[in-house]
Image (cartoon, helix red, strand yellow):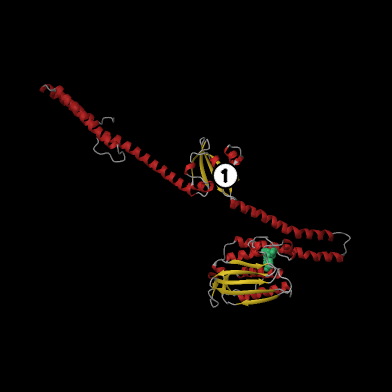
Amino acid sequence: MPKLSMSEIAALGASIVLALLVGPALGLTPWLLLAIALAWIAYQSEQHRRFARWARHPLRRARGLAPNWAETAGSVHRSVHTARGRTRNILRRMAELQIVTEALPDAAVVIDSRGLITRYNPAAGRLLRLNGKDVGRDLLMLVRDPQLARLLDGGIDDHVLEIMSPFDAGVRLEVRVIDVSTRTRLVLVRDVSQLYRLLTMRQDFIANVSHELRTPLTVVAGYLETMTDEDVSDIDVQLLASKLVSPVHRMEALVGDLLLLTRLEASSPPSDSELEAIDVASLAQAVVREAEGLSDGRHEFRLELHSDVRIRGVSKELHSALMNLVSNAVRYSPKGGVITVSFEQSESGAHLAVSDDGMGIAPEHISRLTERFYRVDLAAARVRGGTGLGLAIVKHVLKRHHSTLSIQSELGQGSRFCCDFPSTQTLPANDVSLLEASPEIDGY
Ligand code: ADP
């Protein structure tokens, strides 16, 4: 009950004084006092009733209340208003948090101190096959893995481990447990298969590069050791020195190809200002001239150019790609082989192909040929002097030109490596919007 206001006290006091002054003369003092008391009770009841009615909806403004009641109502109104603001804030944050956890690609499962699931996000449904019925169940009964049991028991340092998914073969999961409170724990599960594959690829790549470099290095070291021998004559030293040229060139080629591949992979696709309108006929002629030097008269070269459409591209890169394909044809075709460079147009775009009638490739190898260091026959490839990166370079150059490499081959019959450029990468022969590229480029 609010305190009486000064005006109420004054009114009540004045009424009582008046009753005491006038009452004796009229002989009605008790009745007047009784009437004042009744009026006071009625007034206070009415204020109380109005206050109670307002209190049912304390967010509305209080009306018709005496100042003291209105003041009380005002402070209640302010507290309720502030509390409502805070609740709204909390609810909004909770909703945001829920949206975030639902959008997370990682599974998040909340468990209680007994390991029973209390809630989970949609990613947990996908990664751990949880559904609504699993709330209240033991996580370990649903994801049966002894390592996970150890993790939840606190038996694993760092509170993180990797397990193979019990649901999807080949999927590797990283599981992390976070103690949120004494009664609540958060289990986060992430699909790390892709990351693991990349790491393995990187390790394989480093192992391959080391191996590729070690072979010529061992040869160089062997010759150098022999050359420093006191008994070796000057003529022998010269002979040994000449033998160093080939392994050193091999290392040089390998490092060159590695740098080129890294550059191609790391840089973004060529910008419009880097693109040229490449005249494929000139490019093919320049590459064939270089390849004739490599072949040293052992092969016959043919050019079949059925289109004069131009390719929008980086000439150095396309030169390097075509050179790799033609030099492969030279290296993997026997003496007397015919190597054809052809260019034609179709509805889907333009096609620049290198065909040979050489050794060919068995079908099971074809899909892997553009992997770095993949060779059909490692020993034979080494003898023929490749770096194992040629087709990986071709694939990356084409990818940067929104184009693809298609390979057809038959063992013992020959192969056809075709660069397929979409129409968006071609320009009519008379288009002068891009400057014409010079095909006379040294290897990229
Ligand atoms: P390399 O430097 O070993 O030639 P590439 O990436 O250029 O590396 O080629 C990968 C493998 O593809 C080669 O080792 C070879 O086995 C096979 N290959 C490439 N081109 C041809 C071809 N024209 N004929 C037969 N096999 C080929």
| Label 1 SS | strand
Alpha-carbon neighbours of circle 1 within 10 Å: few (<14), some, or many (≥20)?
A: many
- The answer to which of 79 and 248 lies nearer the viewer is 248
**Residue 101 at x, y percent in the picture:** 48, 46
Q: Report the residue marked by disc 1.
A: 175
Residue 256 falls left or right of residue 243:
left
* Quadrant of the snapshot with the C terminus: bottom right
- Which quadrant of the figure has residue 414? bottom right
Residue 375 falls left or right of residue 136:
right
**Residue 43 at x, y percent in the picture:** 21, 31
* Quadrant of the snapshot with the N terminus: top left
Q: Is residue 400 visible?
A: yes
Q: Is mark 1 within 8 Å of ligand 1?
A: no
Measured along the vertical axis of the image, is residue 327 above or below residue 69? below
Q: Is residue 438 visible?
A: no
Residue 150 falls left or right of residue 75:
right
> Which residue occupies the extreme right position in the image?
231
Measured along the vertical axis of the image, is residue 163 above or below residue 366? above
**Residue 144 at x, y percent in the picture:** 57, 42
Q: How many marks?
A: 1
**Residue 106 at x, y percent in the picture:** 53, 48
Question: Ligand 1 is in which quadrant of the figure?
Answer: bottom right
Residue type (three-letter) at the residue carrying disc 1:
Val
Residue 428 falls left or right of residue 202:
left
Residue appearing at x 74%, y 61% in the figure: 379
